[in-house]
Image (cartoon, helix red, strand yellow):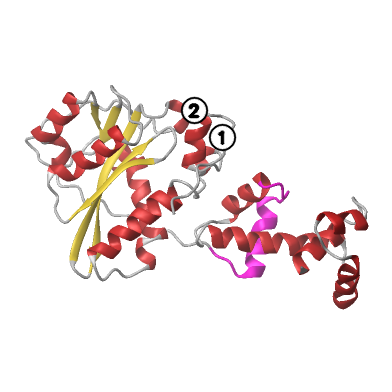
Amino acid sequence: MNEKSALIEAEKDNYPIDWMCTQLEVARSSFYAWRARVGTTTATEARREVLKVEIARIFDQQRGTAGCRRVAAQLNQEGFEASVGLVAELMRELGLKAVQKRAYKTTTVVDGRAQVFEDKLGRGFAPESHSPGTALVGDITYLRTGQGWLYLATVIDLATRMVIGWQTATHLRTSLVIDALEMARTQGGAKKNAIFHSDHGSQYTSDEFINYSQQHGFIQSMGRTGVCWDNAAAESFFATLKNEMYHQQVFTTRGRARFAVAEYIEVFYNRRRRHSSLGYRTPARAWADHHEPTTADPPAAA
């Protein structure tokens, strides 16, 4: 009720109070009682209070991971006009600070005798440079649990930044990365003759993976050995996952870690997290815009 009354106060110079009370289902007597209790505020003060409520809601919705730019983008997309500077100021007043990024360490094991593939992307990771399902990046990361290591392999669609394939395992055999790419192929919309870009990890240079890629029409691409920027899109996702989810918890079992990974990818990252490279859209929204421009974000998984 206080939020609705503050909104009415903020907009009283633009709309009749009686009309706003009716639209917002606020009794006029309740509004005037609220005004008498808190005192008449200026439109600017009332608007700031409304924005604080919305900022806190978005910050909570984004699990404390959104900074002022992402919050401002969502506010404006929802119809609340607010500059990045104003949002930053109000977030400071509310004591809201996004999760800070940590340095991400690569863990690639290279087979120096293995076949090397030409770099087909040349760091051309920008979403606008690709169509969904035609340019993919993959990588592996390690997650420590109370039961030992859990390994995560992912496949990311560059056009939408959506994680379209992923798999976890207790081992680093080639089947881990094949399973992730198979998910992308059968469920994630990866297309035949899509470029699959990776580092020189032994899983990606193995005969087993090369044969799988050739069998299903994937065109392998690799950056230079030891140059993290040549696979920056894949490594950026792992840095984000670890900063926003993994480093915020302690996982006593591999099962708990796997569940958290699944929830983060399928519920939050793909469907709720907004990306600056996508014009502050979610990956699901970007995917839908390529296929059905008027369709809203697919609902989050239960």
Q: Which residue sits at x=38%, y=56%?
A: 263
Determine crowd level at label 1: few under 14, some 14-19, many 20+ residues with C-alpha closer than 10 A.
Answer: few
Residue type at mark 2 is His
Verify CB contact (< 8 Å) between mark 2 and mark 1: yes
Residue type at mark 1 is Thr
Q: Quadrant of the C terminus?
A: bottom left
- Relative horizontal placement of residue 296, taking residue 263 as reference (left or right): right
Question: Mark 1 = which residue?
Answer: 295
Q: Is residue 47 above or below residue 14?
A: below
One can see residue 26 in this view? yes
Question: Mark 2 = which residue?
Answer: 291
Q: Real-space Cα distance between discs 2 and 1?
A: 9 Å
Viewer-side residue, 5 vs 233: 5
Image quadrant of residue 122? top left
Viewer-side residue, 26 vs 107: 26
Q: Which residue sits at x=44%, y=36%?
A: 160
Magenta segment, which residues?
Answer: 78-97
- Does the magenta run of residues contain 167? no
Where is residue 123? Give x, y as percent. Answer: 36, 32
Where is residue 261? Give x, y as percent. Answer: 33, 56
Secondary structure beneath dot 2 equals helix
Q: Which residue sits at x=24%, y=26%?
A: 218
Image quadrant of residue 197? top left
| Residue closest to the far left | 113
Secondary structure beneath dot 1 equals loop
Where is residue 264? Give x, y as percent. Answer: 39, 55
Q: Quadrant of the N terminus?
A: bottom right
Q: Is residue 7 above or below residue 298?
A: below
